[in-house]
Image (spheres, rainbow, N blue to C red):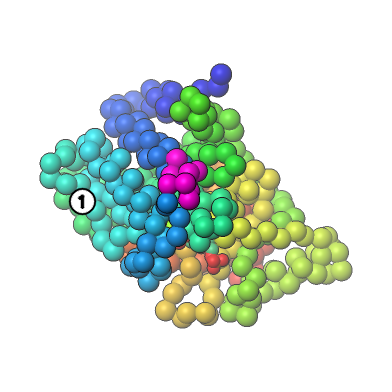
Amino acid sequence: MSKSLIQFIIEEQRAIPGATGDFTGLLSDIVSACKQIAHQVNKGALIGVLGSAGSENVQGETQKKLDVITNEIFLKSNEWAGHLAAMASEEMDDIYPIPAKYPKGKYLLTFDPLDGSSNIDVNISVGTIFSILRCPEGITNPTADDFMQPGTKQVCAGYALYGPNTMLVITSGNGVNGFTLDRDVGDFFLTHPNMTIPADTLEFAINASNERYWEAPVQRYVKECIAGKTGPRGVNFNMRWVASMVAEVHRILTRGGVFMYPKDTKDPSKAGKLRLMYEANPMSFIVEQAGGMSHTGYERIMDIKPSGLHQRVPVILGSKNEVERIVGYHKEA
Ligand SMILES: O=P(O)(O)OC[C@H]1O[C@](O)(COP(=O)(O)O)[C@@H](O)[C@@H]1O
Ligand SMILES: [Mg+2]
Ligand SMILES: [Mg+2]
């Protein structure tokens, strides 16, 4: 049988001089949270977890019952062990300091507990996204300011995909590896070592209903793809849109492609739809580690110095040559 996720992490940790085991402990708590979420998502209506919670999160989005449940699972699994100083989530306005009754640790955790939650009631794949940062040296009671680190500072990023299989895909800056949950054994096993994104692709993903709001460079790119053989690209493209970022990124890691939620004029107060700290940054870390590229069209996402926990950014990520082309269109515009 292939390596379990925890064996894999412990072996990686051994290669780091001075490692204390804190990181391994933290990842094992995250894995435990993802297994619990997989169980809830899998049971669905049988345990009454589908539908709306009747509340709104800080972004003004209606929360699903599972948004609330999965957020609670992540907090409870990760607060007790002494690896973290604080957490931040899509579903909470402010940061979550570790309660005084527990020891505090040296890491910060941000997460989107249920990504693609509009898909949950229609039984389409959803996921969880997380990012681990170091708590700044000497800080025991971090504030939101301590989370304002660019994506290049991430220690680890990952996602769980709750699809036909439950998978966990992680990077700690040493390539990207994918693990599949064996429900009978109750553990994740390495099934997709060294995942890489092909540099070229003939597949793109975008919510085309927003076309009239996009900027000219993205309109040009998509128009050229749709023109296919008869257009300037001289080749046919395929399009996909799942509306779960985790599923789109997983497809791109598996067979290449481009995913875009670009800057648009739909709501001028928002720079994009996706959130930097717990969606764009972790996915960018994974995509770059797999040989892909992740950009806003104007700058590398992981270079952005965050200004707020729930800051939104435009996202263009995936196969390198296509993302470079789209960035080039932005420069020409
Ligand atoms: O419904 P739209 O506008 O196509 O947006 C879909 C995007 O929104 C998201 O669902 C946002 O994530 P949440 O469900 O965590 O809010 C992404 O996963 C997805 O790419
Ligand atoms: Mg999300
Ligand atoms: Mg979410």
Name the one closer to the observer, 238 or 75.
75
- Check disc 1 and report the residue beneath it: 97
Q: Which residues are magenta?
A: 39-47
Residue 54 x, y percent position in the rendering: 36, 66
Quadrant assignment, res 138: top left
Q: Is residue 169 above or below residue 212?
A: above
On screen, 187 above or below 135? above
Q: Nearer the viewer, residue 214 or 115?
A: 115
Tell me the chief SS of the magenta region. Answer: helix
Name the residue located 25 percent from the left edge and 57 percent from the top edge.
Answer: 95
Q: Position of residue 7 (x, y in %)?
A: 44, 23
Query: Is-magenta flag for residue 41?
Result: yes
Q: Nearer the viewer, residue 325 or 262?
A: 262
**Which residue appears farthest toward the top when viewing the image?**
1
Relative side of 125 to 11, left or right: right
Q: Quadrant of the N terminus?
A: top right
Q: Quadrant of residue 106?
A: top left
> Callout 1, which amino acid?
Pro
User: Can residue 8 be seen?
Assistant: no
Horizontal side of 308 relative to 312 (left or right) equals left
Location of the C terminus by quadrant is bottom right
Let me know if residue 103 appears in the view: yes
Q: Is residue 133 left or right of residue 4?
A: left
- Give the percent coordinates (x, y) of residue 116: 50, 57
Q: Residue at x 75, y 59 (%)?
A: 238
In the image, residue 5 above or below residue 144 = above
Quadrant location of residue 56?
Answer: bottom left
Taking the spot 58% from the left edge, 30% from the top edge, the residue there is: 191
Residue 247 vs residue 232, the one in the foreground: 247
